[in-house]
Amino acid sequence: MVPMDRASVQTADTARLITIRGRVQGVGFRPFLFALARDCSLSGTVQNNMDGIRLIVEGKEEDVQTFLAQLPLRAPRLSRMDEIQVQSMAPAGYAGFSILPSEAEGTSTLVLPADAAICADCLRELYDPRDPRYRYPFINCTQCGPRYTMIESLPYDRPATSMKSFAMCPACREEYENPLSRRHHAQPIACPACGPQLSLFSVEGELTEGEPIAETAALLRSGRIVAIKGIGGYHLACDAEDDGAVQQLRLRKQRPQKPLAIMAKSLGHIRRICHVTPEEEQLLLSPEAPIVLLQKREECRLSPDLAPGMMTLGVMLPYTPLHHLLLDELPYLVMTSANPSGLPMLYREEEAFGYLKGIADYVLSHNRDILQPIDDSVVQMINGETDFIRRARGYAPDPISTKRDVHGIHAAGSRQKNTFAIGRGKQVFLSPHIGDLSHLEMLAHWQKEHHHLSHWGQAAERGVIDMHPGFDMNRLLGDIPLAHVQHHHAHMVSCMEDTGLTAPCFGLILDGTGYGSDGNLWGFELLYGSAGSWKRLGHLGYVPLPGGEQSIREPWRTAVSYLVQTFGVHGVGLAMEVFPERKKEIPILYHLIERKMNTPLAGTCGRLFDAVSAILGICHRSTYEGEAAIKLSELVRFSGRSAAAYCHSLEQTDIWELNMLPMLEELMQDLRHGVPAVVMAERFHETVVQGAAALVDAARLPSHSRRVVLSGGSFHNPYLRTYIRQELEKRGYEVYTHKRVPCNDGGISLGQLIAAAQKGES
Amino acid sequence: MKRISLAHGDGGELTHTLIQELFLSAFQTTASPMLDAAIVSMPANEIAVTTDSFVVQPLFFPGGDIGKLAVAGTVNDLAVSGAVPLYMTCGFIIEEGFPYADLQRIVNSIAAEAAKNGISIVAGDTKVVERGSCDGVFINTTGIGVVRHKSKAAYLQEGDAVIVSGSIGDHGIAILAARNELGFTTEVESDCASLSAMIEDVQHGTGGVRIMRDPTRGGLATSLVEICEDFGITIILEEEDLPVHPAVAGACDLLGFDPMYVANEGKVILIVSAAEAEQTLSLLRQHPEGAEAAIIGRITDTQSGELRVRTVFGATRKLRRLHGMQLPRIC
Ligand SMILES: [Fe+3]
Ligand SMILES: [Mg+2]
Ligand SMILES: [Zn+2]
Ligand SMILES: [Zn+2]
């Protein structure tokens, strides 16, 4: 024994302690490291712990170098390494490479894996006539298939999934138990002999004859609308090339304008309708397979009603075997979530048919239950950076690692685009996108999701909620101590955490509406501070919103308010020229504003965009959240930065105020001179860029840092994101934007949680 | 023009003349005016007492005036409490310089509405305050009635129907329009009305009424939230079944108001057993004030106290008390 030990000590002339954080658990990472270490002739150990993976390798220096070089190249496709730390250490003389049991026992180290798009190996088998799973719509393996959506409890084992009702056939069982198989412990393993089956029903619930996929394709080709049960819920599908079908779908869903996402058969098919950059291609092909917003080609031959007023189209690739088989028949399908607006995802069989009556004609369903619903994720690329619009399928509930102890803290999130966050050790579990919590059904859905994630995450010891007084959320977290965090401070801290900043910096937060500590509606804020404390240094000047929330639905009202602010009573006449069809209402709004009746004050980027969008005639009424602002931003989405800004002014009282009324004067002149809308849109965007940058500069004291985080939903606007950054960098600032969580209210819960953790520390 | 002066309220000669000429002749008070208090007889040992102050602006509005409002408000408070209104008192606070003719109009209106309801005005008071200390006329009333129908709130149960006797929000919108707060005119009139006769008919014609409320300030929603919380019941309203006049709906849309939070002065909410809901409706509809009565919701459970509304799209919202809507004086 002794000579052998000595021998291995002698060969190991160097050693490294490597810690890896990211998605490295439950994705076949330890067997991969085992194989890689063996191939590189290294010895050592690997172990899962609370933070990720702890790895010790030792051997010859050149072999260690090879190992480190190969690590990112050969990692399993479902893994994602966010952070790799390598430390030198003295060799301990391991005899070989071994996988150690997880460091902390119990549920705390368990990770609920995310769902993944079908992998290349499974896809090959799907189309191999000799394969037992040839054309089987539920083929999967350890590197692909449903996970989060079918798991009832942890540890992740077949009896704890919705696959428990399917008994494995001997052939599947053999693969399942064979350590050399791709399907070794693939919990959703199935084949035509033993697994789930498809059925096609009329919406009245009658089973149809014939092969479900062929029948569905025939229905779609004839312009019908079919609800399709997928991984995380039901989609409504129709032929995206069929104008009539798309219009019918809009009519039935009462969704006149909101863009509809499509699924396209292949990357080649996407290229025919959209421009695709290499980064976008990578996103589309990733295991997360999100909806990616792509620039529409002019010659795009799909229905123009898919995304009215938009330069972009939300596109995804097929991510289940079923999708592949269907898209073989029709290359472009509308795939929009089937839930009625304001209600939770539709995912239960027993609810589906009731809801879908009058909307879908047929339902393509299967008998594998969805236990946790999840939306498709939506992302866009801005200058090669990923911008999450909706973080859901494929990404959630992957933990986000942090350097703080966030254990036992739960953050309820925002009211719109809600996500919640749960802290465990130094990990944050961000829930999938939940949505707008205005309705009780959504609150109930929130509670169900929260209960589920708390159960395997970490029970709440203290909670954090928004400071809005009319919020229902203080009761959601139960009877625990609650901290309150202001909406825009949460945005700021969310971006700081997302980019690893902890020292005080500026937060430039541009978004829709959030409750401000002075009781007004905030949304164009310059803050300075950190997770622990903050100060508001500046904001956009307030305007009254006549009719309150009604103004958010009807941007023309905010436009009238801005015109009245700018031109006084003369603005009434101008407003009547701009909105002749509102001649009767405008004096009444003026009256409301004068009398301060139901006219809360707002200084928000979203409402400013609304007003300009309405004045330019782009959108008078928003039929979906943010429509007016989004359509205005689409006008300049792919134009460069050449327009001259309109004037703005900055005024200092106890706080800096950005005044956009000079801009409106010039804009109205342009309007009168018949300047094209796109030019005015560019000039307006540039004014916001200049105004925002000037505001930071004006408010900065010599003692302040030069770091600025940008957050808030308005930073989905590529012009603002790109050129505010550029303008600030030109003035010597370091600018940070979100990476892993949305800049919109979907990122609020992360900020709340970190702010609360800071309160606990200090 | 004859106007009210401070001397009309000093307790001297002018006060005496005012009381004799105006109030006593209009109200035909039978109780002895010689004493410091009215002596009345009560045919029961359970009486209902209510008090209210009326400060509405303008004093005269489409559908009524402050006098009619004062009587109707008092009568309705008694009626929804299961009492038959018998007596009331009226205290006037009058601004110096108020036109005598207007006061006369108000007093006549009070007298007429009281006579219609068989309620006697048995005591009163008059004070005149300096110009600017009050806005024309304020009226304070106390109403006394005999309890005829005991509260059946203990019988509230799942499935009970929630009925409103007619369209909601009329009074609030009419007053706003009359104050010129809207910047537009509307044909909406205040629903100001005494409901004791209609309520008495319903009480006699059906045994199923559990509780009643008059949804005045804060509107239908605020009254129902109070019911839900007080009795620990959950009610779900159906948005599409709420009776709202188009002109009220249009005005609310413009103002960003929800008609469920706009005041009524001639409506009653009734919670009745499911079995007698239809009977109740037809009894209500026999009266002009109840012509548009409708079932608007149901009690869905008796575990928690919450008011909800199901929107036309099928999603459900929780309703709270009136919050943050700054309405001027309307009652
Ligand atoms: Fe926000
Ligand atoms: Mg009252
Ligand atoms: Zn696979
Ligand atoms: Zn099988």
Image: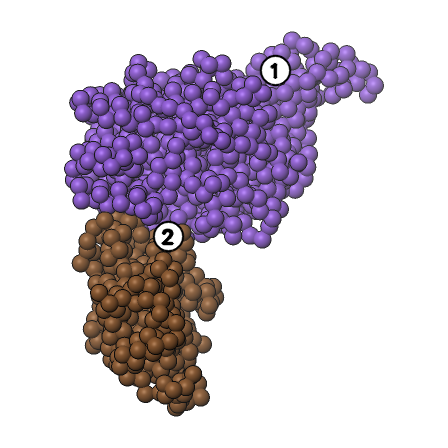
Chain colours: A purple, B brown
At numbered mark 2, what does the secondary structure look like: helix, strand or loop? loop
Percent position of residue B193, x then y: 26, 71
Residue in the image at 37% along x and 43% along y: A600
Indicate the quadrant where residue B296 lies.
bottom left
**Residue sitting at the far front:** B13
* Residue name at image x 38 percent, y 64 percent: B129
In the image, what residue type sits under mark 1?
Phe
User: Label 2, label 1: how many angstroms apart (C-alpha)?
Assistant: 67 Å
One can see residue A495 in this view:
no
**What mark, if any, has residue B325 been given in the picture?**
2
Left or right relative to A761: residue A484:
left
Give the residue at x 49% y 31%: A654
> Residue A67 — which label?
1
> Going by the image, does A55 lie left or right of A434?
right
Q: Is residue B124 visible?
A: yes
Q: Is residue A500 left or right of residue A616?
A: right
Q: Chain of mark 1?
A: A
